[in-house]
Amino acid sequence: MSANKKLLICTFLMSLIFITGANSTTNQNNIISSVSISDTQPTANVIEGAARGEYIVEFNNPPLATYSGGDSGIPAIGRLPDGRLDVRSTEAVAYVELLEQRQSQFLNEVQTTLGQVPQVAFRYQHALNGIVMKLDKKDISILLNMPNIKKIHPVVDQPLLTDIGPSIIGAPSIWDGNANNTW
């Protein structure tokens, strides 16, 4: 196995560990610990905390990474010979542009609905179709009633638990560039 594949696998495992750890931590400084939209009514698990914070607004449309084709006539995204998603293909570029347009439409609707310009920190289309924005507690229930909203997640800072991750999983040679093909 090449050093690049080892690095990719190690990066994936570290991401998985981080994501799993991120889902198990509760931050009492956030207003909403879990917000989702069900088939009938929006639900929110409200906890005490600050009145304003950063939230990830996740949309129903899949991100580029999981797109399987069919939206607005855009076919599924092709793969490169090594199996990676061809993010520079015409289809991928068209789908990312479509998601960006829909996100812009959503932000315009938010401005009209809330009567203020939304404060956007980040916009995502590739691994997640979502926007990070500052919201007041009262705005969350309003946004959950808007079409195409899947979930609203609080942005939670995770403390650094270790700086020796590669040695814990037996991968220091990958990180220092001295990996050989022993896998």
Image (cartoon, rainbow, N blue to C red):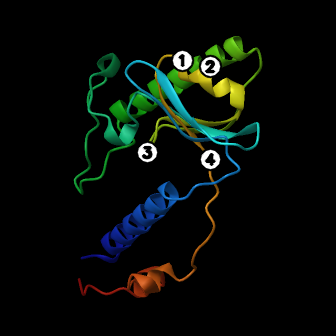
- Near-viewer residue (43 or 71): 43
Q: Which residue is drawn at 54% across and 17% down?
A: 146
Q: Where is residue 106 in the image (x, y as percent from the top left)?
A: 58, 20
Q: Pick whichever of labels 2 and 3 is earlier in the sequence.
A: 3
Q: Determine which residue is flagged by label 4.
A: 155
Quarter of the rendering occupied by the C terminus: bottom left
Q: Residues within 10 Å of mark 3 (few under 14, many from 20)?
A: few
- Near-viewer residue (56 or 4): 56
Q: Determine which residue is flagged by label 2.
A: 142
Q: Do the residues labelled 1 and 2 touch (CB within 8 Å)?
A: yes
Residue 62 lies in quadrant: top left
What kind of residue is marked 3?
A: Ala
Labels 4, 3: front one = 4
Q: Is residue 24 found left or right of 26 in the rendered image? A: left
Q: Determine which residue is flagged by label 1.
A: 145
What kind of residue is marked 1?
A: Asn
